[in-house]
Image: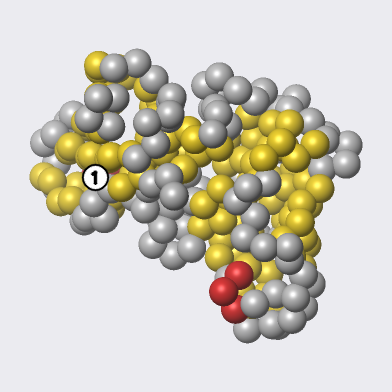
């Protein structure tokens, strides 16, 4: 069974701090990795994807991938209360189309 | 433009009944996916279509679940003899094409409750 593991949280950070979200995956064949944000009662929306080892930055968000350690992370700089949501990590499996999701980490940014 | 739409938004049914859930993908998207999300869990892959054909149905839990996409656009997920354990939010997503790194855009979901 291919799995993606995340800490369920909640991860609580003060406004303006850096939030660090982590994810591990079991399928060494996974090629691409995605971070989705999901507000309560809403559908997931894509924040970033990464497929090469190293860092990828987009605004306040940085995704990091280490395929040797089978580890993916998401850093959110200057966290805002509007960032409070569940963050889902996903990895491709069996090709590029099937996504395996983790259970999500709940982030709470307090003023 | 319009995003992925799903109907109904909520469906309450009784154990043993048959239900159909509909997904209308973003216009021009050739790939369509169905996921199921239970409370406190991430989405669970069910099936993916490339055009009219089901390219991967490995996530369908059993033969009570079936999905079609006859004209390569709208898809219907069909659940026979519903069970209480089928209660979940059923999410549909579409992407421009299969393969590569195309973003999957999710619809608002259908919340299914089996009494």
Residue visible at 19% across and 47% down in the picture: A109
The crowding category of the residue bearing disc 1, from other C-alpha atoms within 10 Å (few below 14, some 14 to 19, many at least 20), is some
Would residue B14 be found to the left or right of residue B99 on screen? right
Q: Which residue is mark 1?
A: A81
- Tell me residue B79's x, y (percent): 74, 65
Q: Is residue B26 above or below residue B10?
A: above
Chain letter of mark 1 equals A
Front residue (pair A73, A95): A95
- Tell me residue B31's x, y (percent): 69, 31
- Residue A16 visible to an observer of this rendering: no
Quarter of the image for residue A88 reads: top left
Q: Which element is circle 1 on?
A: helix
Residue visible at 74% across and 81% down in the picture: B16
Front residue (pair A41, B28): B28
Would residue A76 be found to the left or right of residue A35 on screen? left
- Tell me residue A82's x, y (percent): 30, 43
Residue visible at 60% across and 64% down in the picture: B111
- Residue A98 visible to an observer of this rendering: yes
Total labels: the figure holds 1
Q: Is residue A92 above or below residue A15?
A: above
Front residue (pair B98, B58): B58
């Amino acid at each position: 069974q291919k799995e993606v593991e995340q800490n369920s949280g909640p991860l609580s950070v003060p406004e303006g701090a850096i939030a660090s979200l982590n994810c591990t995956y079991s399928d060494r064949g996974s090629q691409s990795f995605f971070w989705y944000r999901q507000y309560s009662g809403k559908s997931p929306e894509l924040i970033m994807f990464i497929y090469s080892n190293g860092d990828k930055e987009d605004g306040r968000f940085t995704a990091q991938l280490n395929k040797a350690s089978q580890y993916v992370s998401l850093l959110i700089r200057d966290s805002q209360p509007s960032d409070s949501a569940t963050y889902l990590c996903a990895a491709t499996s069996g090709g590029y189309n099937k996504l395996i999701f983790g259970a999500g980490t709940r982030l709470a940014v307090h003023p | 433009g319009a995003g992925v739409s799903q109907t109904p938004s909520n469906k309450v049914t009784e154990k043993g009944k048959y239900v159909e859930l509909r997904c209308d993908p973003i216009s021009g998207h050739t790939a369509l996916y169905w996921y199921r999300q239970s409370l406190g869990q991430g989405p669970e892959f069910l099936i993916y279509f490339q055009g009219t054909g089901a390219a991967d149905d490995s996530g369908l839990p059993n033969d009570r679940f079936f999905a079609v996409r006859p004209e390569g656009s709208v898809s219907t997920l069909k659940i026979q003899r519903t069970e209480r354990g089928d209660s979940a939010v059923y999410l549909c997503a579409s992407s421009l094409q299969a393969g590569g790194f195309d973003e999957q855009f999710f619809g608002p979901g259908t919340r299914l409750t089996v009494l």
